[in-house]
Image (spheres, rainbow, N blue to C red):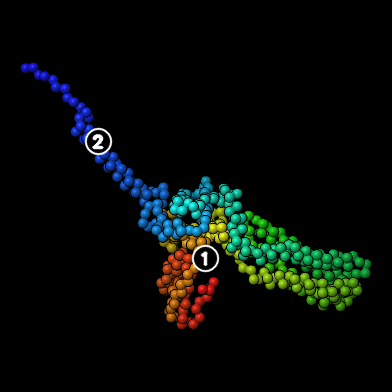
Amino acid sequence: MAVTAVDSEPITQTSPGRRFLVGANVAVTTVLAAAVVVVAQVLAFNMPLRWDMTSSGVNSLSEGTEHLLRSLDRNVRITSLYFETDREEPDQARYRRAVKDLLDLFEATNRARISTAWVNPLKHHEAYQKLKIRLAEKPVFKKELEPYQQAFQTFHDELYGKITSTLQGDVEQIQTLAASPIGGGAGMQVLGPVQQLLRRRLKEVEATRERVEALTTSATPQYAAAIGDLRTLYRDVSDVLKKIGQYAQEQAAAPGLSEEEAAFLRDAGHRYSELVSDVEAQLTKLQELTTPKIDDLLAQLAPTANAILVETDEDARVVDFSSVWPPLDETMTRAGFKNRAFKGEEKLTAAILRVTHKEQTAVVFVRYGGNPLFVGGFLPGQPPAPYADMKLQLEDANFVDREWDVQSGDTPPKIDPAP
């Protein structure tokens, strides 16, 4: 029986077949896309290349933060100073990457107002120094430094010369008296200790000048330390000259002194009076000077401090490592990356608020006796502070907070500046 062969047409050449294959491709692609999204979300939460900045979404900022950033009316510069070295711990790279990702989010939210940068203090030396110089030139710090600069100028232009010329003049005068044939052994027994005191003070004056110059002209000036050196010098010079003057008066009538030696001793108090007056007047001015804000700011920007600097043209704030990365367990002093919370968004937002909003709202917590609301729980048996966390949250939101125990006083706590 003959069988007739029938040519079969490929399924892809029929309309139903083509529709079947296209539909199958779409279904497979959809499933693969869904799988990619799921895997990406899992990775974002567990092994992120970019970190979750809020409790609500991957690679996103909170609505409040976005509103603040978009409503900025001035430029804000944010600089990460998280260091990098060849010998760093693995956690350091994780900290640095998380902060970089956060700064990228801040900048992307309002590129017109926000700029970000990374400066490695251990390698980017020129950029690091320029940053510190830029800070000292900001109006809020420059104005505060005016009395310090005046104090340094007074020392350099006036008191340094007066002190050295007065002390050196007496050292040379005593040397002349000792070489005089009229003078005797009795004179040097009295004048010798004076000469030694004056020489020691001259060395201290020169050493102080060198220290003050080094402290005020270094890449990281230390104005408070320089003022401290001047205070010590002025106090010491005043005390020594007063003691020498008193000693000289007592010894001027000692037997065996020549008339020139006796006259030198009698006139000591008069010679020193003007210098002592000038030194003490300057010392009084220096006592009013406290540590300037720029000193504290620069100290927080130490090369390995892992700080974040937030600036406007007028002001600046440092967000330190401990506030950005608090340990999950407060008793852990050396917690690693996995044992720390990331508070970068809220701490950066608080710093931006402080440099862009100068008017603050004050909140006064009032109680009648009882335990403090803000402080407690540090000692055994001491109750915890019920409002300690709220205090921190208010300060982060740029509020001024005070506590008032009306049982202990009827005067409200002082708020500076006063409302």
Residue at numbered disc 1: 358
Relative to 389, is 325 above or below? above
Question: Marks 2 and 1, how far apart in space?
Answer: 63 Å
**Which type of secondary structure does the marked residue at label 1 adopt?**
loop
Spot occupied by residue 175 in the image (x, y as percentages of width and height)? 86, 65
Q: Is residue 28 left or right of residue 57?
A: left
Do we see residue 260 in this rendering?
A: yes
**Picture quadrant of residue 65:** bottom left
Find residue 33 and report its horizontal and vertical position in percent: 31, 43
Label 1, residues with CA under 10 Å away: few <14, some 14-19, many ≥20? few
Amino acid carrying label 2: it is Val
| Most foreground residue, 390 or 89 | 390
Q: Residues within 10 Å of mark 2 (few under 14, many from 20)?
A: few
The circle on residue 22 is 2
Q: Nearer the viewer, residue 196 or 327?
A: 327
In the depicted view, which residue is nearer to us: 289 or 183?
289
Residue 289, position as x, y percentages in the image: 64, 68
Q: Is residue 113 above or below residue 234?
A: above
| Label 2: which secondary element | helix
* Residue plotted at (69% across, 65% down): 151
- Rendered residue at 60%/52% (across/down): 130
Instruction: Answer with left or right where residue 29 lies relative to residue 324.
Output: left
Count of numbered tags: 2
Q: Which mark is residue 292?
A: none
Q: Please name the residue shown 48% across and 65% down the image.
A: 398
Split into 4 quadrants, where in the image is the N terminus?
top left
Viewed as shown, does residue 247 lie left or right of 113? right
